[in-house]
Image (cartoon, helix red, strand yellow):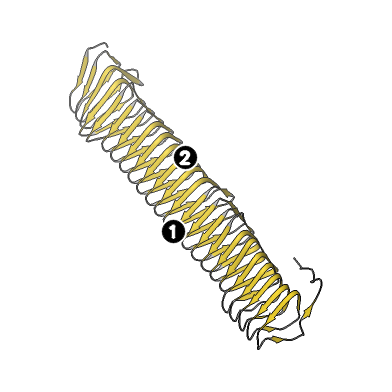
Amino acid sequence: MNLSSVKVSPNSTVEIDRIEGDLYVYENSTVKAKDGREIAVTGTVHCEGDCTFDCSIFAFLLRGRDGEITVYGDLMIDKLVRVADGSLIVGGNLSAVDVEVDKELNVKGNLTVEKVNVGGKLKIGGDAKARDIDVGGAFEAYGKVEAEKIDVGGVFRGKGLVKADSVNVGGSFHSEAEISLKVLDVGGTVEISGGGADKIDVGGTLRSNRPLTFNLIDVGGSVRLTGPSKGGRISVGGTLRVDGDITFSEIDVGGTVKILGSADGADIDVGGKLAVSGSLMLTSKLDVGGLAEVGERLNAKSIEVGGSLRARRIEAIAFVDVGGEIITVEGLKAGRVKIGRRGKIRGVVVAGEVGLEERAEAEDIYADIVFMEKESRARNVYGKRIRLENGCRIMGELQYMEDLKAEEGVYFAVEPKKVDRLPAAPI
């Protein structure tokens, strides 16, 4: 049937095959294909109100308004799909250059477009491929999503791979498969299944239940990662937890850090507590405001801890400065070691310089220079130059090579001994 145009009256059902012109379909009407499969329209399909197509559609343009358009087959449009004040449901695949739907777009199959703009909800049952996806409300994707840019005002939920240059979500982002993104910017929460992203910026919480690679993670609330994860800088306002190993350049956390594995990186700065069950290897500094616990070895250029520091073995090229307590099993080795007022060192200390502030305690010290403020105490001290203020107590032996200065009231359990060679340090 070749016609310049066809009009389908309201509340009617017609059969069509091909139209050389436009098709007008009005309220509560149904269009079927004569061959049972598809219709072809060289011009524009116009829909007013609720319209149903019990077939696939091939057309140049599709325009609708004030209703819900339902296509049970595929919708293949050469140029534009525009539905004003209405929704579009496609039972098969949807292909077009641009798609604009004010309310809801639901595609059971695949979506292939240059640009899609949905005011309300976008739901894709298959794969989605687009240059630009813009959704005012929620975006549900059950297949793979590939786009240059994705903007969602509310919630994104995906079950397949999400691959894009930029994803911006105002509410929450949930992906049950891997992500492959350059930028992920989310106002609320993020739950992902690993993958990779160059930059992740989240206002609330971030959780990845599989390994994640990244360059930058910036989260206002809390982060939970699964190892082995690898990346650059991590900045978190609240808490960071890693279930497994992690490699990074810098960690900056306002609250607490818990790593159930080993960690390798450059810097760690934690306002509260740090706990690492394995080893912690840093090329630069460790700065912790409260307690720092490492189950195995701790290596860093410098270590500064406001509270207590515990590890099996500690090595620092520059210095270790702790306000409260240092506890090791195999010992501490550093360029310089300082323990705060009333602080304690449990385990051997080997350093170029060791300083104990007032009323601090240590066990065995091996150092070039040892300075103990008043009323501090140690068990055995071996050094080149040693200075002891009033009230210090040496409960074992003291050996020195060059100089010993002891103020009044210093107690020696054994008479100090000047030697030509000090005993070899155990570490």
As displayed, is residue 368 above or below residue 181? below
Does 421 sit left or right of 386 as displayed?
right
Name the N-terminal-most of marks 1 and 2: 2
Give the residue drawn at x 37%, y 28%: 114
Residue found at the very far bottom of the displayed protein: 409
Residue 108, percent across and down?
Answer: 38, 34
Q: Amino acid at mark 1?
A: Gly
Q: Amino acid at mark 2?
A: Leu
Quarter of the image with the N terminus is top left
Whether residue 203 is visible to the viewer of this picture, yes or no, is: yes
Does 417 sit left or right of 181 as displayed?
right
Q: What residue does disc 1 label?
A: 237
Give the residue drawn at x 21%, y 17%: 6
Q: Residues within 10 Å of mark 2 (few under 14, many from 20)?
A: many
Give the numbered dot on residue 255. Answer: none
Whether residue 177 is visible to the viewer of this picture, yes or no, is: no
Instruction: Place residue 164 in its image quadrant.
Output: top left
Residue 306, percent across and down?
Answer: 53, 69
Q: Circles 1 and 2: CB distance less than 8 Å?
A: no
Residue 287, percent across and down?
Answer: 54, 62
Number of labelled discs?
A: 2
The Cα atoms of the two marked residues, 1 and 2, are separated by 23 Å
Q: Secondary structure at mark 2?
A: strand
Q: What residue does disc 2 label?
A: 181
The residue lying toward the viewer, choosing from 259 and 341, is 341
The residue lying toward the viewer, choosing from 346 and 34, is 346
As displayed, is residue 88 above or below residue 38? below
Quarter of the image with the C terminus is bottom right
The residue lying toward the viewer, choosing from 344 and 201, is 344
Instruction: Place residue 415 in its image quadrant.
Output: bottom right
Q: Residues within 10 Å of mark 1 (few under 14, many from 20)?
A: many
